[in-house]
Structures are given as C-alpha cells and as structure tokens.
Image (cartoon, rainbow, N blue to C red):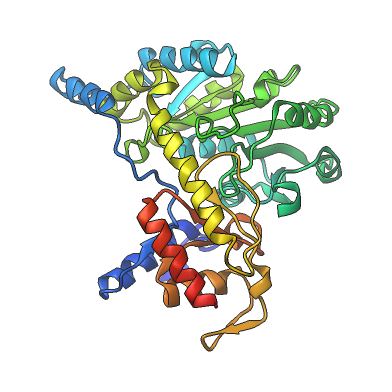
Amino acid sequence: MSQSLSNRILNMSTSATLAMAAKARELRGEGKDIIGLSLGEPDFNTPDFIKNAAIQAINDDYNSYTPVDGYQELKEAIITKFKRDNKLTYTLPQIVVSTGAKQSLANVAAVMLNEGDEVILPCPYWVSYSDIVKLNDGVPVEVKTSIDTDFKMTPAQLEAAITPKTKMLWFSSPCNPSGSLYSEKELEALAEVLKKHPNIYVVSDEIYEHINYTGKPHASMANVEGMFDNTITVNGVSKAFAMTGWRIGYIGAPDWIARACNKMQGQVTSGANCIAQRAVITALNAEPTVVKFMIDEFKVRRDLVLDLLSDIEGFNTNTPEGAFYVFPDVSHFFGKTLKGKTINNATDFSLFLLEEALVATVTGDAFGNPNCIRISYAASQKEIKEAIKRIKEAVS
C-alpha cells in the first residue's frame, strides 16, 4: 500500500541516529552486549531542583492547554536567559516555545521557505537539517569542510555558495556532530559576507552552547553587529540540563518571524506540555553554573576518547571545543577488508563496528560528511574504555 503514501514521506530519509539506535536495540534483544555511542543524549539525570519544580506544577494542578507560544513566565525566563548568557535583548512577541528545538527548526523552515529557496548547510550538519529543508520545498546547498579546518566554513566558502536563490544559512555552534564552535571573530567574518546579502536569514542553532570547553563565552550570531534582525536563534534545555525527554525548545527571532511560527504551530501542535514548561522556567532562571559538573565530566571524557583513539591507526581526529562528540575521519579504512567485510565508506565502517565490535556509532553520511563517523561520549568512562578497546581489536 506504499503507493498510496505521499511523495513527501516516501522521499524523506529516516533519521540515521534513530535508525542506528533501533539496530542496536535489535542486537541487544538477541542477547548481544552492545555499547551505545550513537545517541546525542546526556547520560545524566535531570537535576533534582528541576524535577521538583515539575512535581510542584502537578500538585498546583497545571493541566490545561498552554498558550501556543508558551507561558508568559517561561518566555520571560527565556528573555532573562538570552540577556544573561548571550547579551541579546528580546521581547515577549519575539519568543516562541515549541515541543523541542526540532519543532522550532521545522516551524522556521515552514514559514520562511518557498519552493526552490536554497539553504546553505556547512557540512557536517545536524542530521535533520537537510530533510527539514526539503520537506518544506527548500533546496539544501552543502558546503564541504574538512577536519583540517576543524569542520568550519570559511567566509570565502560562504560567498561562493550564495546564489540569487539563497534564502537562509543554517548551522549549529557548538556543532552536532563535529563539536566545533565558531568564535566571535569567526562569526563576524561570516557576517561581513552575509551583510552584503540582506535578504539572507540565519538559523543559529545553539542547543549545545553551555557544553563549551574553551573557557571563553559562547558567541551568538545575533549578537554580531548588523545581524540581529536577520537571525533566528534556536535553543532548548535538552542537552545542558539533561532534559531530552521533556521536549522543550524555543526561538528568539524578529517579531514577524516569531508571529509566523506562532501561527504555524497553532495549526499543528499548539502549545508545548504544561508540566515541562513549568520545570523549564526553573531551569532557565538558574545560573548555568548549576550544570557545570556535567560539563567538567564531558571534558574528561572527551580527552579520554581522544587519547584512546590516538592509539588506533586510521583514526584521524581533531580536538572538538564543545558538545559531546568526536568526529574522526576514518577514510583510511575505505577499500580495505576487515574480518572478511569490505569497507567502502563510512556507513560500511559504522555497521562493521556495530556487528564486529558491538559498538554503536553513526555514519558521517547522515551529517553530510562521508569520510567520518560520529562517536558520542555521553557514556560512562568505563563504557568508553571498553568500547574503544573493542574498536581497536576489531580493526587491528
């Protein structure tokens, strides 16, 4: 009966990260001891002070439909957060709360893109960007980067990618999957190109902003002179506060874009979960230092992963400055046969690691970079050590 399905769904890719997680679950169901380094999900529990706020909201009988764009108290907390952490000044009509940052992105694409509009995506990019753009009749324009430039797009590359059809630039900093982040100076250099094209709008995905190992403040594109009115800042609480399942994301945007997202959301899902919103008010009103213990542990794990991978021939790594991923170039193995299996690309290599090393990673193909795999270190140090020991044995 698939012929009765829409072309929209038939042409859509399955999320590679979720597909790998499903494959890992299948193998676990067969009794295999799979170590999962594939999902972008902190392995910490949501802090107690946030959970207690949710319990209080239940006891206070929050159970009704919420405003489409979020409780006013939550929007005020988001405004406070933007001012405190990013030196950005938004007003209530410029904030829209959604069911996760992924819905925030989908809203923006739906209200901004017309058929044939081009969206520049520096590679690697988060797995869903390309399909969200295509779902809304846009055309993804991939800009290739490499490990030699820490997977960051240069101003010259940006300029070369711009055409009369360019409508938007989407990027994440810190980046999922590479862990790279753009400094203030690097954003300013990209902005100099963009300011020559005032009809191009930027989606700045800052969901990993607090997971930053540089010791320097997070840099936001909307804070670059001349870019505020052309930037949609996307954020949420899933990564820094270990609240992936609570499903709360948000945008700060020019009011005409925010109003359009509010209108779109009103016809699709309406307002986000009431209890989750009340908990997030408490999370965002807290100083970011409350989650510093997670960031410190992630940095220890990052260094552990890099140290262990450096002892495996064929893994070319850089040092990610944020998020909780490493993105090694594994093209050394392409064309080789390992344990009777020929490795033609990163997808083959990722499947090989799952089947032979019993370690789940994600192919770089899903992120627009066919030479790499993504390894998440949102796992215990014990699991990381065992996983990379298995990988070393499998490829030796």
Nearest the camera: 197 or 112? 197
**Whole-percent x and y of residue 151?**
70, 48
Question: Can residue 199 be seen by looking at this rendering?
Answer: no
Q: Is residue 216 above or below residue 84?
A: below
Q: Residue at x 42, y 28 (%)?
A: 292
| Residue extending farthest bottom | 340
Image quadrant in which you'd find residue 206: top right
Q: Is residue 161 visible?
A: yes
**Where residue 21 sits: x, y (%)?**
39, 61
Q: Nearer the viewer, residue 282 or 64?
A: 282
Residue 275, how many percent across, how many down? Answer: 25, 27
For the C terminus, give its image quadrant. Answer: bottom right
Q: Residue at x 68, y 51 (%)?
A: 123
* Residue occupying image coordinates x 63% and y 33%: 203
| Quarter of the figure with the N terminus | bottom left
> Quick one: 317 or 80, which is closer to the camera?
317
Residue 329 lies left or right of residue 355; in this view the side is right
Residue 91: x, y in percent? Answer: 53, 10
- Above or below residue 343? Residue 294 is above
Where is 67 relative to 236, above or below? above
Residue at image location 80% in from the left, 30% down from the top: 189
> Would residue 261 appear left or right of 290 to someone viewing this image?
right
